[in-house]
Image: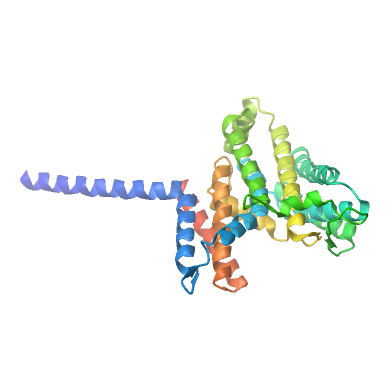
């Protein structure tokens, strides 16, 4: 009997240790994006030094990090909504290129003011988003195919619009100049880059929208179980179209910010940006199957990519190797996501 009691105590002890390990692993998986951000931030802080100076933690460099992630982050917010309903949008980078080109052309060649330009650019992004949503829902074509075609259309229109070359933006008051007010999107307020402020404000808006509104509940319901959502009375097609329109508008905002930051609009801008947006969403913990994820996670995912790119850049790591590292991180994020499910 004494032997049996001893063995049972050992088994109980092993079970407790196993449960403890499972809880630790579950916590890591649940907060994978936060742990990932803390890890890359710590590594960057340690290794990015030169002559006793910490290059990474320099205020100017940190401002550059948040500025550099803003365009990708803004697009990634829209991509989060799309992926939450089980969709995908490969056209966001091309829409950025088209809207940046449009903004530059409207101001430089048609003497339009900032407000007029922004309204037209946002309408252009919304039109592409509506096209993606309507064709994928009403015609029943897979979103992957629709947005792939939309990407090609947007890129072709941008090249036709500009004649295949970039349109430089010069500020002034005369004809052939962009209004000085447009330059605000490339400047800083209180030391904080305006693009980062745009990203933060949009992030807060969509965090609130997803968490506290009926629209947000419908988004999660559709991603979780579209059939059940339909049976509960949710107009699935309308919600999906709205989400693609939002993704298009956010891509247009990113295109506007991009044009101001680089002082030009080029049809080649935004190539590959759709992959960065998807990576930020995936690293942030949003399930690519839909129904699970948050905008907060996407913001953290965008920060992880930004810190990683900055760290590798400061260490003069080959850009091709940077792509390899980024790809491996996405795979790790997907493995953790699989463990979560």
Q: Residue at x 48, y 59 (%)?
A: 41
Q: Position of residue 166 (x, y in %)?
A: 83, 63
Give the farthest residue toward the top. Answer: 233
Place of residue 15 in the rendered image (x, y in percent of width and height, measured from the top left): 25, 46
Q: In this orientation, does residue 141 appear?
A: no
Residue 337: % across, % down:
49, 50
Q: Which residue in the rendered view is the most extreme toward the left?
A: 2
Q: As rendered, which of 219 and 209 lies closer to the eye? A: 209
Quarter where residue 101 is shown: bottom right
Q: Is residue 19 left or right of residue 77?
A: left
The image quadrant where one finds the N terminus is: top left
Q: How was the colour assigned to the protein in this rendering?
A: rainbow
Depicted 239 relative to depicted 260: above or below: above
Q: Can you tell which quarter of the image residue 320 is in?
A: bottom right
Identity of the residue drawn at 51% across and 55% down: 333
* 196 lies above or below 54: above
């Amino acid at each position: 009997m004494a032997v049996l009691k001893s063995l049972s105590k050992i088994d109980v002890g092993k079970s407790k240790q196993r449960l403890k390990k499972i809880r630790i692993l579950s916590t890591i998986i649940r907060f994978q994006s936060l742990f990932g951000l803390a890890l890359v931030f710590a590594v960057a802080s340690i290794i990015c030094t030169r002559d006793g100076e910490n290059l990474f933690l320099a205020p100017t460099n940190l401002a550059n990090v948040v500025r550099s992630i803003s365009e990708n982050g803004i697009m990634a917010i829209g991509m989060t909504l799309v992926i939450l309903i089980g969709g995908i949008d490969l056209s966001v980078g091309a829409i950025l290129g088209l809207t940046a080109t449009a903004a530059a052309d409207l101001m430089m060649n048609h003497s339009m003011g900032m407000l007029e330009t922004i309204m037209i650019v946002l309408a252009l992004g919304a039109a592409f988003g509506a096209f993606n949503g309507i064709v994928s829902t009403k015609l029943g074509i897979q979103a992957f195919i629709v947005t792939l075609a939309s990407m090609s259309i947007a890129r072709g229109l941008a090249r036709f619009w500009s004649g295949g070359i970039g349109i430089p933006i010069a500020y002034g008051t005369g004809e052939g100049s962009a209004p000085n007010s447009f330059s605000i999107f490339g400047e800083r307020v209180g030391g904080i880059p305006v693009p980062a402020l745009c990203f933060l404000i949009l992030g807060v808006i969509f965090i609130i929208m997803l968490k506290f509104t009926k629209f947000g509940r419908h988004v999660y319901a559709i991603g979780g179980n579209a059939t059940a959502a339909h049976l509960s009375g949710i107009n699935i097609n309308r919600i999906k179209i709205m989400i693609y329109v939002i993704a298009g508008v956010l891509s247009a905002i990113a295109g506007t910010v991009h044009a101001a930051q680089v002082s030009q609009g080029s049809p080649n801008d935004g190539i590959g940006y759709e992959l960065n947006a998807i990576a930020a969403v995936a690293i942030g913990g949003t399930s690519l199957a839909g129904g699970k994820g948050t905008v907060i996670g996407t913001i953290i995912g965008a920060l992880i990519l930004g810190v990683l790119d900055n760290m590798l850049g400061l260490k003069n790591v080959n850009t091709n190797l940077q792509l390899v590292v980024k790809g491996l991180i996405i795979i790790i994020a997907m493995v953790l996501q699989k463990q979560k499910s």
